Image (cartoon, helix red, strand yellow):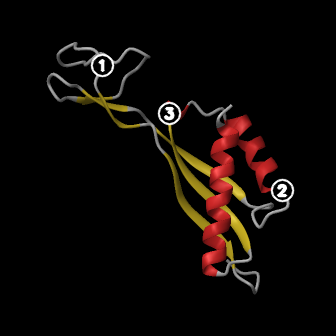
Amino acid sequence: MHEYSLMQALMDKTIEIAAEHGHPKVERIKLQIGELQHIVPDILEFAFEVMAKGTIAETADLVWDVVPVKIKCQQCHTEFEPHDVFWVCPQCESSGGEIKQGDEFILESITFVDPAGEL
């Protein structure tokens, strides 16, 4: 359940950014999460609720986009999206490869509520 450690790091960074810019409340947090993170959405949501409780993000919405896995074949350099746990190049049938995307956990944006209560 690495969702908890990811959420703790996310909350720490969110609070740090809010403090740097003088924002009192978070409205929305948007992430990019790669498929290789193997995130369980329900656990991520629960971890967010637990970590956000009592903070400036307590009522914030957490949203994310899932980033598909892309592999670059080490033999022929074809980039492909694997369809199972075996990374076999569809061009030359070599196995393995270099991860080009899909292992991300990126804080894409934070939407703050301004002191007047407007977005």
Q: Is residue 106 above or below residue 89?
A: below
Residue 5's quadrant in the figure?
top right
Identify the element where label 2 is drawn: loop
User: Which residue in the protein does label 1 denote?
Assistant: 96
Identify the element where label 1 is drawn: loop
| Residue 10: x %, y % from top left | 63, 54
Q: In this rendering, which labeled residue sits more in front, label 2 or label 3?
A: 2
Sequence-wise first label, 1 or 3: 3
Q: Is residue 4 above or below residue 75?
A: below
User: Which residue in the protein does label 2 denote?
Assistant: 53
| Residue 61: x %, y % from top left | 71, 57
Residue 1's quadrant in the figure?
top right
Q: How many marks?
A: 3
* Crowdedness near tag 1: few (<14), some (14–19) or many (≥20) residues, C-alpha within 10 Å: some
Residue type pointed to by label 3: Glu
Residue drawn where x is 40% and y is 20% of the image: 83
Residue drawn where x is 14% and y is 24% of the image: 76
Q: CA distance from mark 2 to mark 1?
A: 42 Å
User: Which residue in the protein does label 3 denote?
Assistant: 35
Residue type pointed to by label 1: Gly
Q: Is residue 58 above or below residue 94?
A: below
Task: Using the image as rendered, state which of residue 19 and residue 113 is in the foreground.
Answer: 19
| Residue 117: x %, y % from top left | 76, 81
Question: Does 63 sit left or right of 53 as displayed?
Answer: left
